[in-house]
Image (cartoon, rainbow, N blue to C red):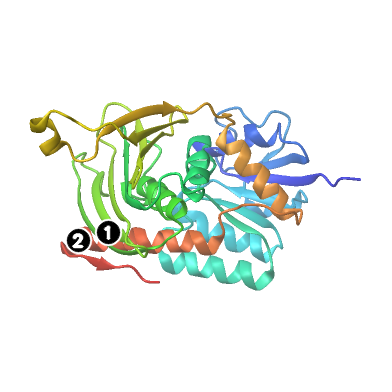
Amino acid sequence: MTRTLRVGVVGLGMMGRHHARVLQGLDGVALVGAADGRGDVHGVAGAVPVVSTVAELVDLGVDAVVVAVPTAEHEAVGLRLAAAGVHALIEKPLASTAAAAERLVRVFEDTGLVGAVGHVERYNPALQELRRRLDDGQLGEVYQIATRRQGPFPARIADVGVVKDLATHDIDVTTWLARAPFVRVGAGACRKSGRGHEDLVTVTGELADGTLTAHLVNWLTPYKERVVVVTGEHGTFVADTVSADLTFHENGTVATGWDQVAAFRGVAEGSSTRFAIPKREPLVVEHEAFRDAVLGRPADVVSLREGLGIVRIAEAVLESARTHAIVEVPS
């Protein structure tokens, strides 16, 4: 008989409410409770009990918990869950500092519990298809990965800036697509909205395999843009993670006979193809992977150790922005 996993959610804010929604419809999972000191402000818990503390949630008999509280609280909540023997899916970034992330990694690894980080973009269908095609060699040598993640300021974020809240998506996606870590970064950041944290950052980087990267991230753009552009030997892939579309612009094979154009064009323009791909909700796929990992099945989750690496890169970005110098990323 297949076991039903008893799962809870800590934090019913912007992300927590989506986790609760997905969990209530996920095969093999029962949402048995949620914890939030403010109660169920979005009305997503339904008949599920909503308690005030993590201890009360643990007392409901949970096997695993999704941690969707503000980043500054991730460490404390994660450590309480580990002490209670509860598996955890912790929203990204893993913690507000690398030191806090290291403590979470250590305790979950020492106890043998499943710990995962909610880098949900890895489960976006456009990026999953892009990674499959890169692994298949369809782009040949990869030269550059560039990302744009721009939009209005989200009032829900108060404890970290745009680097740790948003740029961590692009840092993680870049290393995941390339299967190579960052070795150095350079960044510029500023504060334009009067908040205590940066709201705009530009980042350049280099990966261990020589791939160059560029990332434009801000909370100052009056429209939402989520784009990943991978340029290589045979052309360019463009993934739009808002629409989950993946397009390939291939290098042309037709010679340009117009000398004045050929002189500056570089590679020739070829055909463009937008791929038809299945489009499942990334959060559902992420939760299926976490469920399977907790049940001991093969599963592709983002480990806490991977999450720690992303926090370290984010801190290198902030150091570079502060010192106006290229920063080597700790291995």
Q: Which residue is mark 2?
A: 322
The one nearer the camera, 202 or 138, is 138
Compared with residue 303, is residue 118 higher up or lower down, i.e. above or below? above
Q: Real-space Cα distance between discs 1 and 2?
A: 6 Å
Name the side, left or right, on which 111 lies relative to 215.
right
Percent from the top left, x then y, of residue 227? 36, 36
Residue 183 appears in the figure: yes
Locate the C terminus by quadrant. bottom left
Percent from the top left, x then y, of residue 236? 34, 39
Name the side, left or right, on which 17 lies relative to 27.
left
Residue kind at label 2, given as amino acid type: Arg
What residue is drawn where x is 67% and y is 55%? 55
Residue kind at label 1, given as amino acid type: Leu
Residue 35 appears in the figure: no
Q: Residues within 10 Å of mark 2 (few under 14, many from 20)?
A: few
Percent from the top left, x then y, of residue 57? 69, 49
Q: Which residue is mark 1?
A: 318
What residue is drawn where x is 49% and y is 59%? 307
Which quarter of the picture shows residue 255?
Answer: top left
What residue is drawn where x is 62% and y is 52%? 300
Compared with residue 236, is residue 60 higher up or lower down, i.e. above or below? below
Percent from the top left, x then y, of residue 109? 62, 69
Q: Are marks 1 and 2 in contact (CB under 8 Å)?
A: yes
